[in-house]
Amino acid sequence: RLRLAAVVIVLIAVDMSSEAARAVVTAGGDIVNVKERIVRDFLAAGQSVAIQAAIDGDLTAAGTGVVIEESVEGYALVAGRRVEVNGPIRNDLWVAAATIDVNAPVGDNAILAGRNVNLHSSAPVGGDARIAAGTGTIEAPIERNLNIVARSAQIASEIGGSVEARVQRLRVLPGTVIRGDLLVYGPYQPEISSEAKVLGQVRFNEVAWRSQWSWLWWWLFGFTALLILGL
């Protein structure tokens, strides 16, 4: 499925107009290093992609490994085996990868799907966060709501809105503040630290755990639509 996301990016990029196509960087299985500022929307595909200069527009990137070290003024759509975001994203961040590490601020929404998803404390989210993961760790403050689907998840941050979790196991760690409701669907009660605060209601709905990866197909559909429409 992650390979499918990468293929979608490349096929759509190739079908762009000649002006847009000149912005596509491919490395033929080698390394793509962006070291000079890009003043328009940018698309990159390669075995390894490193964004080491600022992008003034939107970024679309696919590779086995993708690292974003500098700021992206628009949105970022990324697919790969391992994705690391160390530069701020001013708009939405969309990522599909086996392993995702977000270490820098996201201006609006964060939509992340992967086997291991880590939203670190240095990566505050200015809008909503929507996460599908095998294992999800949320340490970053989220301005609005958090929606998470995971086998195992832990929250150690401040959530400005509500949390909806469809999980096998959920831990709410000390210091966590959820300003809205906590809604949990799964086979086990959430583990909520006595040092965590939920200012709204806590509601647990006992349901059998089953795979929730249909969410990823929804994600890919939206990912493709954004690319086609150029939003």
Image: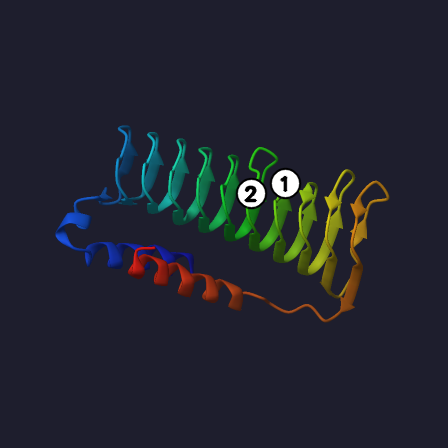
**Quarter that holds the C terminus:** bottom left
**Which residue does the numbered mark 1 point to in the structure image?**
141
Whether residue 48 is situated above or below residue 203 in the rendered picture: above
Give percent across and percent down for residue 116.
Answer: 56, 48
Amino acid tagged 1: Pro
Give percent across and percent down for residue 65.
Answer: 39, 42
Give SS at disc 2.
loop
Along the line of sight, which residue is nearer the eye, 168 or 144? Answer: 144
Q: Residue at x 45, y 44 (%)?
A: 82
Q: Residue at x 72, y 71 (%)?
A: 208
Q: Residue at x 47, y 66 (%)?
A: 218
In the rendered structure, the answer to whether residue 37 lies left or right of residue 90 reads left
Give SS at disc 1.
loop
Along the line of sight, which residue is nearer the eye, 211 or 53? Answer: 53
Amino acid tagged 2: Val
Along the line of sight, which residue is nearer the eye, 210 or 44? Answer: 44
Q: Is residue 45 visible?
A: no
**Quarter that holds the N terminus:** bottom left
Q: CA distance from mark 2 to mark 1?
A: 6 Å
Furthest toward the left, the residue is 18
Q: Is residue 163 visible?
A: yes
Furthest toward the right, the residue is 194
Q: Residue at x 37, y 58 (%)?
A: 5
Q: Are marks 2 and 1 in contact (CB under 8 Å)?
A: yes
* Residue 125: mark: 2
In the rendered structure, the answer to whether residue 112 lies left or right of residue 186 reads left
Q: How is the image coloured?
A: rainbow
